Amino acid sequence: MDMFNPAHPGEVLRELYLQPLGLTVTEFARRIGITRKSASELINGRFGLSLETAMRIGLATNTSAESWLGMQTQYDLWQARQRKLHKQIKVEKLAA
């Protein structure tokens, strides 16, 4: 089931963890072991999650990497559909 305009994982991270805990981008980056630049790009929705970053966030927030990667996938698919990417892709159907 598709979501309508799902949140970027960075937005969720900022709203549910960083702001309530009063964490800066720098402190968040230090705690999970990534660069401040990568953390800033993620939190501001300019960068998607890698598998490793999803695992780091999952461990730090006591959640699963799968939940973070699922958010990223939903966000990416919705964005691609808004760009009508599926209409630009040409494929031959596979016969079963």
Image (cartoon, rainbow, N blue to C red):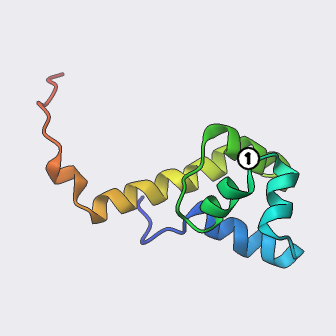
| Residue 26 vs residue 60, the one in the foreground | 26
Look at mark 1 in the image and give the residue it sits on: 64
Residue appearing at x 13%, y 39% in the figure: 90
> Which of the 4 image quadrants contains residue 78?
bottom left
Residue appearing at x 71%, y 65% in the figure: 13
Residue 15: % across, % down:
71, 75
Task: Classify mark 1: helix, strand or loop.
Answer: loop
Q: What amino acid is labelled 1 in the image? A: Ser
Residue appearing at x 29%, y 60% in the figure: 81
Looking at the image, residue 58 sits to the left or right of residue 73; the answer is right
> Which of the 4 image quadrants contains residue 23?
bottom right
Looking at the image, residue 47 sits to the left or right of residue 60; the answer is left
Q: Quadrant of the N terminus?
A: bottom left
Residue 38: % across, % down:
66, 53
| Residue 56 vs residue 31, the one in the foreground | 31
Q: Quadrant of the C terminus?
A: top left
Residue 94: % across, % down:
16, 25
Residue 19: % across, % down:
79, 77
Looking at the image, residue 67 sits to the left or right of residue 57; the answer is left
Above or below: residue 1 compared with residue 23: above
Above or below: residue 76 compared with residue 95: below
